[in-house]
Amino acid sequence: MKFSRALLVLLCVIASEAVAKSSTVSPTLSYWHHKLPTTPMPSALRELISPLSSSELLADMKADDGEESKVSVSVGKGGVNVGVGKGKPKPSPNPNPNPNPKPQPKPEAPVTRNPSPGKGGVGVNVGKGGVSVGKNPGKGTGVHVGDKSPFNYNYAASDDEILGDPSLSSMFLLENDLQSGSKVNLQFLERSSSPADSTVFFFPRSLADAIPFSSQKLSIALAKLNISQGSNKALSMKQTLEECEGPAIRGENKYCATSLESMIDYSTSTLGTNDVNVLATNVRKGQQYTISGFPFQSKAGSKSVACHKQSYAYAVYYCHETEHTTTSLVSLKGEDGSRGEGVAVCHTDTSGWNPQHLAFKVLNVKPGGAPVCHFIPNDHIVWLRAN
């Protein structure tokens, strides 16, 4: 039986983890503490670090895709043994079988214009019918207009996507509206309250690097992850790869991080220091909030790195450097009395954005004009120099 080189690399990664699993903590968590010893990890990131080994992550993912696939790793006196098994779960016996079953008509396959979200967390999609909320193949909070992220400043929003939908106006706001006492509608920030059921996890870097991350090699990645070509999850992965490989706007430095370790390296190298603040929104319920204060606010025009969660089979973040921003940690009080914190980013130079971007249409401003601000969803991250 012959194995491809790529499969052997993947199995070696799994085997090496199995040897050390019983005596070590997560390699991802260890890397954070090594590189950022004085920086607290936001809960939005901690929730994405799985206690499972690489083999268990893969097996769990494959089981979610509808097939029972097992990667077994055993460590004994004879060394490390790695076995890959695949099969479909056996059907449960019918306790009351019908001796004369009637033939059932074959259901028609649903027709979808845009890939509908697969199994996972809450997604917000804005199309011709307005805003739709559904479950996302990436199992995290996804905010999309059509099939594009509003945090990709290259994309153009059509009039059909925003016509007659007042909820879109809450996604962006002007800097003058970001004041104590102002009311903001943050319905789109809500995420699942059960991380264990609604979250895809980071792969350890060693495992993530063993799986191709490119449009040209998507079929190889799908095969390794046991994801069917043409499935909703595969289509979502394809869209994310196209966004990651697309051109950056003028003055933007972008990178798609396939592991938390790679996000740490990109963000710290971009900022030029390991002494960083890592901020995330912590709002558990989408509702109207009143701004009650600003515990933190960066210097105007300071450099930052924003990382936006993408829809993928495992946790992937679209990160980009921005130099003309002001970032604020905002204290919020909900209309139900609950309290939380939101991260608001104001862009002072939008001259490189697509003139048809959603922000310009809902705020009625032009590229390079008044600063454009937005709150980031719960599972998005902003990195700043601590000093």
Image (tube, rainbow, N blue to C red):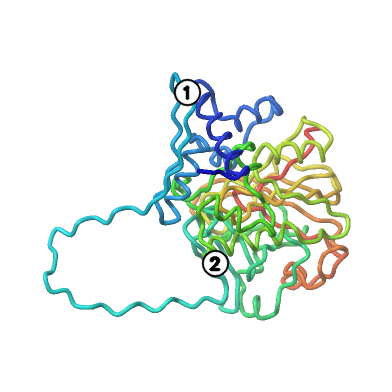
Q: Quadrant of the C terminus?
A: top right
Kindly identify which residue carries mark 2: 230
The residue at the point 35 percent across, 77 percent down is 107
The residue at the point 86 percent across, 63 percent down is 352
Q: Secondary structure at mark 1?
A: helix
User: Could you say where residue 356 lies in the image, as x and y percent from the top left?
Assistant: 78, 73
The residue at the point 79 percent across, 45 percent down is 304
Cβ atoms at labels 1 and 2 below 8 Å apart: no
Q: Secondary structure at mark 2?
A: loop
Depth check: 186 or 26 in front? 26
* Rendered view: 87 above or below 46: below
Question: Quadrant of residue 220 in the image?
Answer: bottom right
Residue 22: which numbered mark, if any? Answer: 1
Whether residue 313 sits left or right of residue 154 in the image: it is: left
Question: Quadrant of residue 184 in the image?
Answer: bottom right
Whether residue 79 sits left or right of residue 263 in the image: it is: left
